[in-house]
Amino acid sequence: MNTHKGTRHAVTALAVFATITLVLLWLTGTFSGGRAEAAAAKVEAPQEDSGPGEAQCADVAHSPPPSGQPDACSPAEGVAVAQANPNLKEIETKKCEHDIRQIDCDECRYELGVVKVQPSVLQALTRIVKVEQSEALTKLQWTGQVQFDQTRMVDVLPVAPGKVVAVQARLGQQVRQGDVLAVIRSSEFGEAKATYLEALAAAEIATREKERQAIISAALEKLLAALETNPTAPPTSRNEPLGEWRAKLVGAAARLQQARIVAEREQALLDKQASSQAEYETAQREFQTAQADSMALVEEIHLNLNLDRLKAQNAARLAEAKSNAARQRLHLFGLDDPAIQTVSQTNDNGRFAELEIRAPRAGTITAQNITEGNRVEPTQSLYTIADLSNLWVWCNLYERDLAALHASMAQGHTPRATVRVPAFEQPFGGVVDLVGSTVDETTRTIKVRVQLQNQGGMLKPGMFASVDVDLPTGGQVSLVPRSAVLTDQGQSFAFQHWKDDFWLRRNVQVGKVQGDRVEILAGLDPDARVVASGAFLLKSDVLKAKMGAGCAD
C-alpha cells in the first residue's frame, strides 16, 4: 500500500516538473506542438508570410548595421509588417466562441494580440513612453586615440643661459599664467639690468639738460625782444639764467651805449664849432661799429640758441631711445612694466642677476626637465604646460565612409561625435572639426580630428577610444527605447496603447540603433505610447496560445 502511494507521489512530481518545463519552453519560444501550434499560427500567421527580411530587421535592434551602410530592410518589408498587424476595426467587432466581443473575453483576447492591464499594475511594473520623432541618421564608427590639443600646449624655455637656483613648480601641478616656475642666475640678465640703469640715468640727465636749455632759450628770447625795442637796454634781471651770453650782451650793450654818448657829444660840439669834423666822424664810425657788433652778437645768439636747443633735444631723444631699447631687452627676459619699474629700486645685489621663469599660460605641467643646481641653455625645454580642458581624438576613417562625412560637412553641418574609452562607462561629447588631406598608404585610412571637452579631467592623452558619429540624412524616423522591442520566433514587436486599459501587440520593422534607442521603420503610429520596460508582463499574457489556453478548451 505504501509502495503504491510512493509511486503515485513520484509520478505526480514528475508530471508537475514536466508541466513547469513545458510552460517555460512555451514562454521562451523554444518549443511548440499540438493544438497550441494551431492557435499560435492564428496570431503569428502574418509574420510567417513576411519572409526572412523581418528577422534580419529585428536583429538590427541588437546589433547595428555596418558603419555608413544602407539599411537592409526594404520599404516592401515595411509594408508587409504593417499588413501583418490586425485591423483595429475588425478586432473591435470580432466575437469569440463565447458569443461576446473577443477583446472583452479574458480567455480569448490574447489571440488578437490584445492585453488588458489594470492602471495600478501598469504603473507599478512598467514604464510607458511616447514614440519620439527624430531626424534619420547614418552612423559611422571609428577607432582613435586621445591626444593633447596642440594649440593649448607650450614648452617653457629660458630666455638666457644660467644656473638654476630654485625650482618652485613640479610635475603634474596646476599653474596659472604668470606663476613663478623656477629661478635662474644669469649674467646676461644682470648685464641687461645694468645697461637699463645706465640708460635710465643718461636719459634723466639729458632730460634735465633739455629743460635747462629751454629755460635759457626763453630768457634770451625775452631779452632779445627787449633789445630790439631799445638796443642799449641792459639785461633786466640777474636771476634769469642767461649763461655765458649774459657777459657778452652786457659788454655789447655798454659799448653801444658809450659810442652813442660820444657820437651825440661830438655832434653837439661840432654844432657849437667846439670840435673838428674829423673827431665827429671818428665818433660816428665808433658808434656804427658798436651798433654792428651788437647786431652781430644778437644774430650769433639766435643761431647758437637754436643750435643748443636742437642739441639738447637730440641728446634727450637719443637717451630716451637707449632707455627704451634697454627696457625692451628686459621685456625679452619676461619682465613686465611694473617689474621693470622696480629694477631701479632694487638694492639686493645678491639677487640682481636672478631671473624668474614664469608660466606663459595656465594649465597642467605635463613634463619637467629642470633640477636645482644645473645649468640651462635657451634651447632647453624646462617645462611643458598643457591645458587639458580640451583634447583631440585622432580617428581612422576608412575610404568607404568618406563620402557620407564629406557630404554632411559640405552642407554646413558640424558632425557631432560620441567618444567612449574603456576606463569609463559614460560617453563624452565632441565635434568633428578636421578631415585629413591624405590617405595612409598602409592602413588606407584618413585621419579625422574630434574636439571634445575633458569633463573633470577624466580623459588622459594616450587613451584608446571608440567614436560614433551620427550624420543626418534629411528624413524623419520614429525612435523607441531598445527595451520596448521584443522578439518572438524572429519577429520584432512592441506593445502599443490602444484605448482605455487595452494594449495591442504591434509587429514592427526596426532600423538602426541610436545609442539606447532604436529606429522603428514601420508598425507603430507616430504619436503612439508604448511599453518601454516591463513588457514581458504583457508578452506572457499574449503568448498564452503556446501554453494551450484559449477558446478551444
Image (spheres, helix red, strand yellow):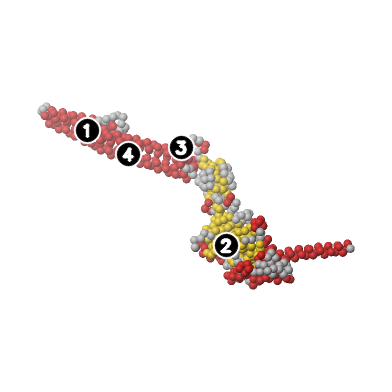
Q: Position of residue 516 (x, y in %)?
A: 61, 59
Compute the Cα span from label 2 to label 4: 92 Å
> Is mark 2 in CB contact (under 8 Å) with mark 1?
no
Compute the Cα span from label 3 to label 1: 52 Å
Q: Using the rendered image of the protein, determine whether residue 235 is visible from the camera's viewpoint.
A: yes
Q: Residues within 10 Å of mark 2 (few under 14, many from 20)?
A: few
Compute the Cα span from label 4 to label 1: 26 Å
Q: Is the residue 530 above or below the residue 51 in the image? A: above
- Residue ID for mark 2: 527
State the residue in front, 536 or 380.
Answer: 536
> Is mark 3 in CB contact (under 8 Å) with mark 1?
no
Q: Amino acid at mark 3?
A: Ser
Q: Position of residue 70 (x, y in %)?
A: 57, 67
Q: Which mark is residue 230?
A: 1
Q: Residues within 10 Å of mark 3 (few under 14, many from 20)?
A: some
Q: Position of residue 346 (x, y in %)?
A: 48, 36
Q: Amino acid at mark 4?
A: Arg
State the residue in front, 173 or 455.
Answer: 455
Compute the Cα span from label 2 to label 3: 79 Å
Badge 3 element: helix
User: Which comes sooner in the sequence, label 2 or label 4?
Assistant: 4
State the residue in front, 363 or 529.
Answer: 529
Compute the Cα span from label 4 to label 3: 29 Å
User: Which comes sooner in the sequence, label 2 or label 3?
Assistant: 3
- Residue ID for mark 3: 344
